[in-house]
Every structure is written in structure tokens, then in C-alpha cells.
Image: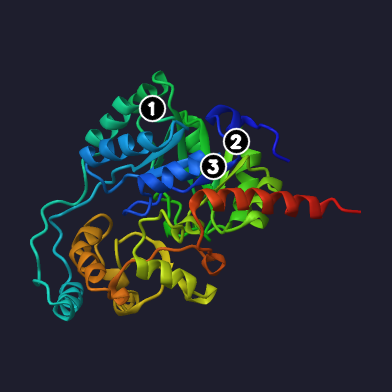
């Protein structure tokens, strides 16, 4: 079951288990290093970090492990800051700000970090893996990474996106099923129906591309990993499973919400960022749901709610926090990240052995 495959061999990891690159502070250097030390691949979700923060995090990871790890960034998207924010949206956001006792209608001048500067740090620090989400990396950057020996992974939510990624030259594809927590990695504008389940998506992508496929979405234990491998994936990428680990940087209320969640309370929303994402339903999502068609697109809405999310975290008010989680979140466990990896390995072995018993 655990013989080397193209992914484990290329990435020089013992187990075909990848910790998903969750941006926003959850993927601390301690978490990334612990997963890699245990034989999986830890990944730094660096999309919201400044270039200097990325460099410092990479150095911190290397202080903790000499094993391979990855760094993930979001491909920048075109956006229009001249479009006025709908009065209904501005009013709803200010109502929340009053409840949090923070200034209303703050002036937002920065909407995202410079991707070019973030990527430059990656090129200088040369992690084993670079993965990206929300688009296709430009050919020049892709070539620069490959010249330094970095393995490049793209994210696809449909077969067509996977075909585009392969044609663009990526080394591997993370097939993100609809069960996955956090933002959808979709990038083809003419492909709005991207909520394809992992079980349906993975084998279709495997059959259409020649490069290795990583299954992502809905896996929390060895049963899910065994299923992913049976579908033709050569590795499984888990995110929510690591959020409740001791090394995770997720807010304590976020971890508690995962432990207390039910599959029916984990929904899709655009309320926090303007981009579809899956998380644990709360008052903020319900409040903005009627205004969905009026919300500005990502990253504008993401920037507009940054002060609300930060204040809610500081004030311990989960009603206004973004608590991303996948559909199988109720299966979450409180373990050390390294312990979780080893437990996943044993569970996968048992699941596979159970399938071949006579």
C-alpha cells in the first residue's frame, strides 16, 4: 500500500499525505514542520502574508525541520476599486462594526499583497514545493521555479481546469472536490458549476491528464485517504483535519466550532471575501446572504471585512469570524500534527486491509 509512487518519490516524502495550504494564519511554522517531520508534506499558506513574513516563516520552518515542505500563494485576479459599494452592503457592514465598537466605513487602500514580491521570496528561498490557487501561473514564473528545482502544483475544481493546468506545465494537480473547506480554487470564468464532489472529480481528472493527481476535499481520516488512492490519486491533501491540531494557528473559537459542528451547518458563502468558500455557518453569513448579488467581488469584499474579522477574533465573537471548514469537519480530532499523520497512516493501512479480506 505504501510503496513509493511518483508523488512520494519526487517530493521525497514517506507518506502520500499533504497538509493543505490554509491561508490566514492556521499553517504556522510549527504545524508545517511537524507534518513534514512525520513523513508527510507540510505547506505554508502564505497568500495573505507580506514578503518579509513569508521569508521569516520559511526560516522558522527550516529551524524546525530539514524535511521538504511547500509554500502556497493565490494567483492575483483583476478587480475594480472604482465601483461604489452598494449602500445595502455598506450599511450591513457598519451595523456589525457598531456591534463590535470599531470605526465605521474605514478607508481601505490595500486589497492584496504584491504577488510578484511574494513569489520573489519563494524563488530566493527555494522550498521543495510551490503550489498556487485561483488561476494559472504565468509561463515565465513557472520556468523560473522549475529551473531552481521547485515542484509546482496547481489547483483544479473541474476537468477543464486540470487540462489547462497540465498544458501550462505544472508538475502535479490538486483536484479540489466540493467538500473542501475554505475558498474554491476555480479559475475558468466560463466554468461556474464547480461544485463537483471529490469522488466524482478525481477519477475524471486522473483519466484526462498524464501528470500525478492529488485528491483534496472531504478527507479527515484513513478511510478518506484509502478512498482517494482507490480513485487514482497518488496523494491525499487534508486541511480541516489539521485545524484542530495543537500546532495549528486557528483561533480557539474556530477549533471549538469544528469540534461542535454538524455536516448540515457547514455551508458555502461569499459574505467574508466575495469569493465562494465553505465554512461553519454563523450570524455574519446569515446577515449578508440576502445581499449576495450586491457583494463586491474578491479581493474587495475580503479587504472590506478584514477589520470586522480581526475585531471579532480579538473580542472572542465567533458570530463574525470566518471559520473555514470542510464538510467532514465533525470527524476532527485534537492531536499533535505529527501524531495525526502517523494515525492517518495506520488508519489507511487498516482501511485498505479491510477491503481485501476474504
Relative vertical location of residue 328 with respect to residue 355 in this rendering, above or below = below
Would residue 354 appear left or right of 125 to someone viewing this image?
right
Q: CA distance from mark 2 to mark 1?
A: 26 Å
- What residue do we see at 64% from left, 48% from top? 345
Mark nearest the camera among 3 and 2 is 3
Q: What SS does tag 2 mark?
A: loop
Residues 22 and 28: in front is 28
The quarter of the displayed image where residue 17 is located: top right
Q: Please name the residue that numbered disc 3 is placed on.
A: 38
Q: Nearer the viewer, mark 2 or mark 1?
A: 2
Q: Picture quarter containing residue 15?
A: top right
The quarter of the displayed image where residue 310 is located: bottom left
The quarter of the image holding the C terminus is: bottom right
Q: Which residue is mark 1?
A: 142
Query: Which quadrant would the N terminus be assigned to in this image?
Result: top right
Drawn side of residue 347 relative to residue 247, left or right: right
Sequence order check: which comes first, mark 2 or mark 1? 2
Mark 1 vs mark 3: which is more N-terminal?
3
Q: Determine whether 35 is above or below 91 in the image.
A: above
Which residue is under mark 2? Answer: 14
In x, y percent, where is residue 321? 30, 69
Amino acid at each position: 500500500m505504501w510503496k513509493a509512487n511518483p508523488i512520494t518519490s519526487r517530493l521525497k516524502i514517506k507518506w502520500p499525505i499533504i497538509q493543505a495550504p490554509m491561508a490566514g494564519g492556521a499553517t504556522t511554522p510549527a504545524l508545517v514542520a511537524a507534518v513534514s517531520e512525520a513523513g508527510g508534506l507540510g505547506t505554508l499558506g502564505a497568500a495573505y502574508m507580506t514578503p518579509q513574513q513569508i521569508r521569516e516563516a520559511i526560516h522558522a520552518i527550516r529551524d524546525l525541520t530539514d524535511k521538504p515542505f511547500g509554500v502556497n500563494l493565490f494567483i492575483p485576479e483583476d478587480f475594480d476599486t472604482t465601483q461604489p459599494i452598494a449602500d445595502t452592503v455598506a450599511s450591513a457592514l457598519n451595523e456589525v462594526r457598531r456591534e463590535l465598537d470599531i470605526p465605521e466605513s474605514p478607508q481601505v487602500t490595500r486589497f492584496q499583497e504584491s504577488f510578484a514580491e511574494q513569489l520573489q521570496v519563494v524563488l530566493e528561498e527555494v522550498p521543495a514545493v510551490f503550489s498556487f490557487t485561483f488561476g494559472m501561473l504565468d509561463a515565465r514564473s513557472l520556468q523560473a521555479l522549475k529551473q531552481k528545482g521547485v515542484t509546482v502544483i496547481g489547483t483544479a475544481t473541474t476537468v477543464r481546469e486540470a487540462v489547462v493546468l497540465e498544458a501550462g506545465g505544472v508538475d502535479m494537480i490538486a483536484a479540489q472536490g466540493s467538500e473542501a473547506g475554505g475558498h474554491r480554487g476555480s479559475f475558468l470564468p466560463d466554468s461556474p458549476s464547480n461544485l463537483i464532489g471529490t469522488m466524482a472529480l478525481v477519477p475524471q481528472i486522473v483519466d484526462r491528464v498524464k501528470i500525478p493527481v492529488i485528491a483534496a476535499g472531504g478527507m479527515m481520516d484513513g478511510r478518506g485517504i484509502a478512498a482517494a488512492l482507490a480513485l487514482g490519486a497518488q496523494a491525499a491533501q487534508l486541511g480541516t483535519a489539521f485545524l484542530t491540531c495543537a500546532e495549528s494557528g486557528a483561533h480557539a473559537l474556530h477549533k471549538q466550532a469544528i469540534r461542535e459542528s454538524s455536516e448540515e451547518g457547514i455551508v458555502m458563502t461569499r459574505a467574508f471575501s466575495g469569493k465562494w468558500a465553505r465554512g461553519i455557518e454563523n450570524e455574519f453569513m446569515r446577515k449578508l446572504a440576502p445581499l449576495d448579488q450586491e457583494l463586491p467581488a474578491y479581493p474587495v469584499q475580503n479587504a472590506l471585512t478584514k477589520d470586522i474579522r480581526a475585531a471579532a477574533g480579538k473580542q472572542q465573537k465567533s458570530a463574525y469570524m470566518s471559520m473555514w471548514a470542510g464538510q467532514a469537519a465533525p470527524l476532527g480530532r485534537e492531536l499533535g500534527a505529527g501524531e495525526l499523520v502517523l494515525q492517518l497512516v495506520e488508519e489507511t493501512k487498516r482501511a485498505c486491509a479491510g477491503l481485501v479480506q476474504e
